[in-house]
Image (tube, grey):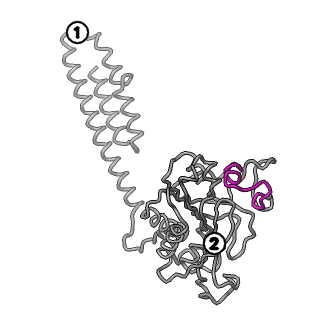
Amino acid sequence: MKKMLQDLKDSSLSAIGSAASPEALESLRVKYLGKKGELTAILKQMGKLSSEERPVIGQLANEVREHLSKALDEKREQLYAKQLESRLISEKIDVTIPGIPVKVGKKHPLSTVLDEAKEIFVSMGFSIASGPEIEYAEYNFDKLNHSAGHPARDRQDTFYFSDDDRILLRTQTSPVQIRVMENRKPPIRIISPGRVYRKDEVDATHSPMFHQIEGLVVDKGITMGDLKGTLNTIIKQLYGEDTITRFRPHHFPFTEPSCEVDVQCFECKGKGCRVCKGEGFIELLGAGMVHPKVLEVCGIDSKVYSGFAFGMGLERMTMRRFNISDLRLIFENDVRFLDQF
């Protein structure tokens, strides 16, 4: 058995020294030192030895095991060192080469103006509310005092999902105001920003998909003066103290009295151009005192409470804020245009 152990030692050391990879080395470890390896097979024959020979052969077997284990460890370190060296060479980085510039993104101008508006409204005590973009006609029209034959309900103006015109893409964020009034007692002071959809032709100031910021205030003693003062404050904070506004009488089914608010055209300064279509002013928002029927349908006593509501187009606010003359530029994702902001 001494010769068998010596032969095993010589052959295994030679094989270990020739191993070309950690995987091959692991296979040799299993072959020689594993539970079913060659050294174990030799030791199983010790039962045939005399009591005097067993300690001698046992000591020799332990020495062989130690030699092989040591050789395996040394070879493993050599192979890993060689692999590391190869990787360092193959993955070598020339630090003198100029780096690849990483272009950092920035806010879209719509997001910038929306965040500014939110900050202004929140500082004035408003909270932010949201609702579904796919809406029921009951919330989009009926509870907002739109009669059955109102032009806004026409299929030429609204994107409907159902044949009975019960489900649609909301045309305004006013349904959010209804949902808030149904579930919250006055005083109420909220804004509801979000996407809305109408069948508008695309031009310099219109799009079939756009964004609105609508506001609602309901409390005791709210007047038209509160509405005008709030809107003037907001507009001047957004566009500067020298911003010129114009309030015009109008009609909305859900407010009475109603008005539209314009800002002087930033392109022509009131002289008239293609952006303002010769008017000198650009319509910014609609507003008015909440109609008593709207309050009552939401369970609010119109004899005790009054309120005002308004809705402004975020795209037009953005155009005024950054002096953008064509709304289509905002949606075309031309990096050359967006890089300016």
User: Which is nearer the eye, 55 or 223?
Assistant: 223
Pinpoint residue 130: horizontal percent, then vertical percent. 55, 53
Quarter of the picture containing the N terminus is top left
Left or right for 205, reference 243: right
Q: Residue at x 76, y 57 (%)?
A: 153
What is the three-letter code of the residue carrying label 2?
Answer: Glu
Q: Is residue 152 magenta?
A: yes
User: Which is nearer the eye, 158 or 204?
Assistant: 158
Pinpoint residue 256: horizontal percent, then vertical percent. 64, 63
Left or right for 28, reference 157: left
Residue 50 is marked as: 1
Q: Residue at x 49, y 56 (%)?
A: 220
**Where is residue 40, by image quadrant?**
top left
User: How many residues crowd around disc 1 within 10 Å: few (fewer than 14), some, or many (20 or more)?
Assistant: few
- Provide the residue span drawn in magenta: 135-153
**Residue found at the very far front of the displayed protein:** 303
- Distance, label 1 to label 2, CA atoms, is 113 Å
Tell me the SS state at disc 2: strand
User: Which is nearer the eye, 284 or 38?
Assistant: 284
User: Which is nearer the eye, 272 or 287?
Assistant: 287
What is the three-letter code of the residue carrying label 1?
Answer: Ser
Tell me the SS state at disc 1: loop
Residue 333 seen in the figure: no
Q: Is residue 57 magenta?
A: no
Pinpoint residue 190: horizontal percent, then vertical percent. 51, 57
Please give the residue where the numbered disc 2 appears in the rendered image. 260
Residue 170 seen in the figure: yes
**Residue found at the very far bottom of the displayed protein:** 271
Relative to residue 177, is residue 94 depicted above or below?
below
Pinpoint residue 305: horizontal percent, then vertical percent. 54, 54
**Where is residue 122, by image quadrant?**
bottom left
Task: Evaluate if marks 1 and 2 touch, with contact meaning CB atoms under 8 Å apart.
Answer: no
